[in-house]
Image: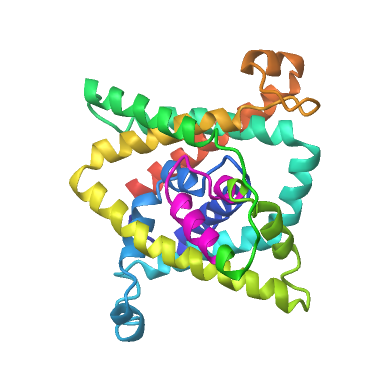
Amino acid sequence: MKLTNNYYPIILLKGMLMGIADLIPGVSGGTIALITGVYKDLISALNNISLKNIFKDLLKNFKSNKFDFLSVLGLGIILSIILFSKLILFLLENYNNQISSFFFGLIICSVYVLLKKVKPIKILDIILLLFSSFIIYQLLKINAFEKEIDITYIFMCGFLCSSAMILPGISGSYILLILGAYQFMLKKLNTVFLNDSDSHLYIIAFVLGAISGVLIFSRVIKWLFKNFENKTLIVMIGFILGSVTKIIPYNNKDQEIIGVYDFFISDMSLIFWAFLGFSIIIILNTISKKNEIQ
């Protein structure tokens, strides 16, 4: 993807959408990257990070290594996490069904858009799609466990979450929820601007773990795309499809999963939020196509 100065605001917006997605359990920033057309550039840019490129040839090859793209996208992610963590916490506590409906529409539309990019779809592709969907479905059924939280544990959480974040369909926030550290880290983020050295230490440990995980796992993803591009994309679409089970809204009173049809019939206004999520993917996909043509 060739970037121009006029295109940077769009990359920033996509980064912010990834940041928002990473704050919501069940929603993956990697999914947003894939459906908005920046996933391959993200993986490529991450693979270009090395001691030589950073300390010796940083300015010389800044654009050719896609560090300009990575900087703008990363800025968007960081801005979202800092600016919207309190808002997301409030929305999840008070408007969970609306948020769930919005992302339900977003995920369903993204699966359709991404499947159109796989040509032709073979029998093996369908088997891979169903198998990868089943794997994620089973993974997301794991219940959270309790663990004493310290700096080392938070570093490990950052490592595991970042690996999940760049995989479409696997929510870094949900991994954090399973590890029993989601609420803990969200509260620490909410105090980032306060004079709280304890919070700052935990945030630094998490960030260092996240950076380590991203740098290692991005190389695996790049190799898979280089050698098995279509199959890798199919598996990732399966991951997204399997994650829908965590997006399906539930009844807030008894926490029991209910049918999608019954849910939307019970509150017709939720159809609007699902349609809004669906529409945003259509708009982002249209913008991406126009920029590719340019």
Q: Residue at x 74, y 18 (%)?
A: 268
Q: Is residue 155 left or right of residue 200?
A: left
Q: Is residue 90 magenta?
A: no
Instruction: Using the rendered image of the protein, determine whether residue 10 is visible from the camera's viewpoint.
Output: no
Quarter in which the N terminus is drawn: bottom left
Q: Position of residue 44 (x, y in %)?
A: 31, 59
In the figure, 194 relative to 261: above or below?
A: below
Q: Is residue 165 left or right of residue 275?
A: left
Q: Main secondary structure of the magenta part?
A: helix
Q: Is residue 164 left or right of residue 249?
A: left
Looking at the rendering, the stretch of residues picked out in magenta corresponds to 155-176
Q: Is residue 43 left or right of residue 104?
A: left
Q: Is residue 157 magenta?
A: yes
Q: Residue at x 46, y 29 (%)?
A: 241
Q: Position of residue 182 (x, y in %)?
A: 65, 52
**Residue extending furthest toward the bottom:** 56
In the figure, 241 relative to 196: above or below?
A: above
In the figure, 191 relative to 281: above or below?
A: below
Q: Position of residue 110 (x, y in %)?
A: 46, 33
